[in-house]
Amino acid sequence: MPYHVEPVAFVHAARSAPEDDLWGGEQARIVLVDALQPAALAGLASFSHVEVLFLFHQVAAEKITYDARHPRNNPDWPQVGIFAQRGKNRPNRIGSTICRLLSVEGKVLTVAELDAIDGTPVLDIKPVIREFLPREATRQPAWATELMRDYWSGKP
């Protein structure tokens, strides 16, 4: 059953093309759409972090993966299902990132380390509440750690 979702905001960022790594230190502005008022952000500045759900809007339909693949098409890493990785070629093209909240001014959020490009539609913004984070240690395979090695590093 199809479900229609409208963006609540759009990303304004320096990067205009998707990139795999070096997102550390990036800042972006998230600007609410005209239909939403600043009151929608009331109280959000009390939180240190927000989770931003967004649409990978530049992924063409023919690039979407519905089964398994090598992450980043790297044959050195195991072939795993699309739901066992965070690639942009997902069936619904939805991304999610926890960002540091730098400021809230009117209808604009300024965040650090949002890995979304300029013009990205934002589907939702949620405060990060400690009790929703994992309550025990997390685990991940070695290939995921290797893949993420330079993801949050700064520009070379």
Image (cartoon, helix red, strand yellow):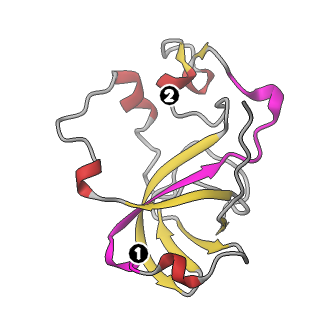
Q: Give the CA distance from mark 2 to mark 1.
A: 29 Å
Front-most of residues 132 and 83: 132
The type of residue carrying mark 2 is: Gln
Q: Quadrant of residue 81?
A: top right
Question: Does the magenta portion include 51?
Answer: yes
Q: Which residue is mark 2?
A: 85
Q: Which residue is mark 1?
A: 44
Q: What kind of element bears circle 2?
A: loop
Q: Quadrant of residue 118?
A: bottom right
The type of residue carrying mark 1 is: Leu
Reply above or below: 45 against 53: below
Pointer 2 or 1: first along the chain: 1
Which is more foreground, mark 2 or mark 1? 1
Q: Tell me the quarter of the image containing the N terminus.
A: top right
Instruction: Residue at 74% x, 48% y: name it.
Output: 57
Instruction: Residue at 46% x, 64% y: name it.
Output: 25
Query: Residue 100 placed where, x, y %?
Result: 39, 66
Outermost residue, bottom side: 106
- Give the side of residue 65 with respect to residue 97, left or right: right
Q: What kind of element bears circle 1?
A: helix
Front-most of residues 126 and 140: 126
Over which residues does the magenta segment extend? 43-65
